[in-house]
Amino acid sequence: MKRAAWAVPALITSYALLGLLMNSVGTVILQSIAHYGVSKPQAATLEACKDLSVVVASFLFATALPRFGFRRAQIGVMLAVAAGALAISFANSFWAMQLFFVLVGLCFGIAKVATYSSIGLVRPDPARHASLTSLIEGVFMVGILAGIWLFGWFIGQDMTGQGWLGVYRVIAVLALATAVLWWFADLDESAAKAAQGEPGTGYRDALALLVLPSTIAFLAAIFLYVLIEQGVGTWLPTFNNQVLHLPSAMSVQASSIFIAALAVGRLSASGLVARLGWLRLLLGCLALIAALVLLTLPTTQGLHPRANMGWLDAPAAAYIFPLIGMFMAPIYPIVSSVVLSALPRERHAAMVGLMVIFSALGGTIGSFITGFTFDRFSGQTAFYLVLVPLVLIALALVRLERLTRKPSNGTA
């Protein structure tokens, strides 16, 4: 295999591994409460350690990555993850976990900018760009699923209260192997480097992009999408337990249907976007999400707890509602691809930095709004609110399509 051919497997592998780590925070929160004796508010700081670090990394490093090099950044990220994972496998304390998730957030922020900026280097034409973006985001979800079962196996084997930390030794080996994969990969980054005196690096370019109408429409769609995804994903286990009255363990396990649906949706969209066109595909997905919400949530009214409920006699909503993930899945990668394909490659890093920042803000706000509504009103009301951002996303997508359809002059 030529060295250039290693780039795509390296992109997929590193992004999936970071997906595993980024979405392990819920499991680690449970373990921290059980084994470190911290309160729920204290344990919740792990989420902030992760998300705020993503924003910081995107803000500080996004515009500098083209000069440093995307491949070098990916190697550095994987080596840092390997070292951190190995250290945390021996450091049995909550403050060490907080530091580790700060590291994970920083590494993810850097790697996401490098990953999305590199897609245009290996797949420059719009159709193949969208296909690879969907594939990478789909494998990201596969990494999350793998993490759920990997952590679950180690927790199930833990007899001492700290044996579950052995999972991080496995992660350290995987990260080191991925760093080696990147070492052998060859990535031509010349197109990503701005010409002397032209925009493309620095915060001025990010600010210049921020005022473009296409950027505003794009960031609005991304913000609203992540608001929905995190709101549903974070509170689905609680919805399963308190509204559908599933047993606690089953509530968590059933929430993995949502993650699996996201993975299937993104992997499927990789082939559909070229056939249907991105706007038609995404508007259809939004309509199907709304239909599932309106058809499923009414069936959850008036349910009562039942003894010994299992998979065979669980409410149908436990299986049907999480399938909205299949139709949500294509939105994020395809919209990102549309905008990046319309920009010169030297401006991708600045745009991805903005994308990561608005994604993190959307996720934090979405989780808060859903939780607040769930607490003050009901789980059904919290999930019915999904319909509002769905309409706004549709409007943003139509606006974005009109703007990106115009002949490009290098400014999107």
Image (cartoon, rainbow, N blue to C red):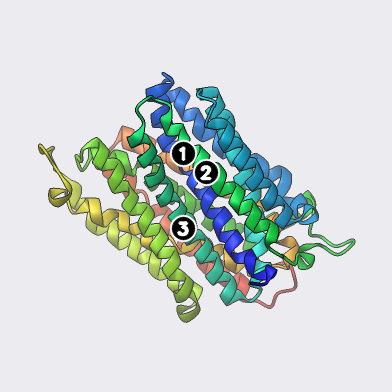
Q: Where 100 falls versus 137 (above or below)? A: above
Q: Which residue is mark 1?
A: 167
Q: Hey, what amino acid is under mark 2? A: Ile
Q: Residue at x 33, y 60 (%)?
A: 290
Residue 30 seen in the figure: yes
Q: Where 264 falls versus 273 (above or below)? A: above
Q: Nearer the viewer, mark 2 or mark 3?
A: 2
Q: Hey, what amino acid is under mark 3? A: Leu
Q: Quadrant of the C terminus?
A: bottom right
Q: Residue at x 67, y 72 (%)?
A: 2
Dot 3 lies on which element?
Answer: helix
Left or right placement of residue 110 versus residue 286 in this view:
right
Q: Which residue is mark 3?
A: 392
The image quadrant that residue 341 belongs to is bottom right
Q: Residues within 10 Å of mark 3 (few under 14, many from 20)?
A: some
Q: Hey, what amino acid is under mark 1? A: Val
Left or right placement of residue 346 versus residue 181 in this view:
right
Which of the two discs, 3 and 1, labels the residue nearer the N terminus?
Answer: 1
Q: Which mark is residue 171?
A: 2
Residue 81 position in % (x across, y down): 60, 42
